Amino acid sequence: MKKKTVSVILTAVLTAGLLAACGSSTAQTGAESQPASTESQQTSAESAAETTASTESAAESTEAAPETDAAETTVESKGTITVAATSVPHAEILAAAAPLLAEQGWTLEVTEFTDYIMPNEVVESEEMDANYFQHITYMESFNEERGTHLVSAGSIHYEPLGIYPGKQNDLSAITDGAEIAVPNDTTNEARALLLLQEQGLITLNADAGINATVNDITDNPHNISFVELAAEQIPRSLQDFDFAVINGNYALQAGLNASTDALAVETSDSEAVQKYVNVVAVKEGHENDEGIQALVQVLKSDEIKKFIEDTYQGSVVPYEE
């Protein structure tokens, strides 16, 4: 198992203790049983006066005692939601969601993984409630290849591919024979080619879609040379090429900002984004569980959208349905 450290993000359910303030006073009169006399009447009068004074004092004390508001409502614990995730950006987003879930009575427990297989296996086995690390196309392919029964409980964000400048910095003035680095895995190469087609640099076979490869290029007016590399290697080699198409997460790790550094990025309505939106995945039949629905609603909340926008500045984008 390729598991990094197990980091558990636990947020305590907020509780408030019940405070009470009260004032009281007790007065005793020690009148003994004896024949009435002037002295005893005087003593009784004095005792009554003292009792009256004590009662008035108690009333003043009670009146002067600080008033306390009704105790805050204690949040009832609803249980724990266990989620498998990769570190950036998924575990970071979940950490921001944890306090919001706690306000509803849910404790969020996150386990970080460094591979893309175990997070699905622990959900399939129901060892964990959900995972948040993959796009929907990968999940569907995983189901086909391994016979698992994973479904999306909610679409949360996408990590746009961007075209970044290397030796050249103007796509409209690209030179003939320019070299462009693209990811070599089937999923992301197709995304890269679709993005380049959107920029008018190439034309793809109309039937290729999200399965496109360089062999599906039907028109290449600038005679661009495509260099296929492992996606994680491209940022390190950026200056060796005229341009490069880089995944959002790898751009983020390399200190690149899709909104300010990329010359073009995938848009929310593009075919690629629809197919590569990152989802909360659960085993089929659990998508409507109360805890899962609470998790999805928080991840799609305005607070988390703002966190994503402020933190990742375009390298991770909230998905709008």
Image (cartoon, rainbow, N blue to C red):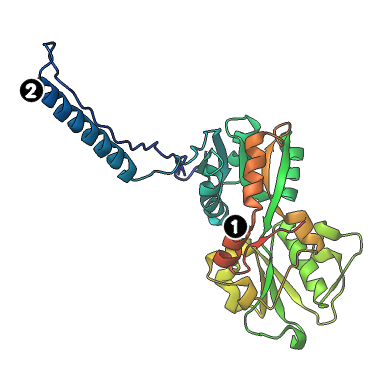
Expressed as whole percent of the image width and height from the top left, the position of residue 303 reads: 59, 57
The answer to whether residue 72 is left or right of residue 156 is: left
The amino acid at mark 2 is: Glu
Q: Residue at x 78, y 57 (%)?
A: 274
Q: Work out whether 202 lies above or below 153.
A: below
The answer to whether residue 248 is left or right of residue 140 is: left
* Kind of element beneath mark 2: helix
Expressed as whole percent of the image width and height from the top left, the position of residue 52 reads: 24, 33
- Res 258 → quadrant: bottom right
| Residue 88 visible in the snapshot | yes
- Res 286 → quadrant: top right
How many numbered badges does the structure rendering display? Answer: 2
Expressed as whole percent of the image width and height from the top left, the position of residue 154 reads: 71, 46
Depth order, front residue of 222/56: 56
Contact? badges 1 and 2 (CB < 8 Å): no
The answer to whether residue 24 is left or right of residue 309 is: left
The amino acid at mark 1 is: Glu
Q: Work out whether 286 lies above or below 262.
A: above
Q: Dot 2 corresponds to which residue?
A: 39
* Kind of element beneath mark 1: helix
Q: Residue at x 62, y 37 (%)?
A: 291
**Numbered circle sitting on residue 303:** 1
| Residue 233 visible in the snapshot | no
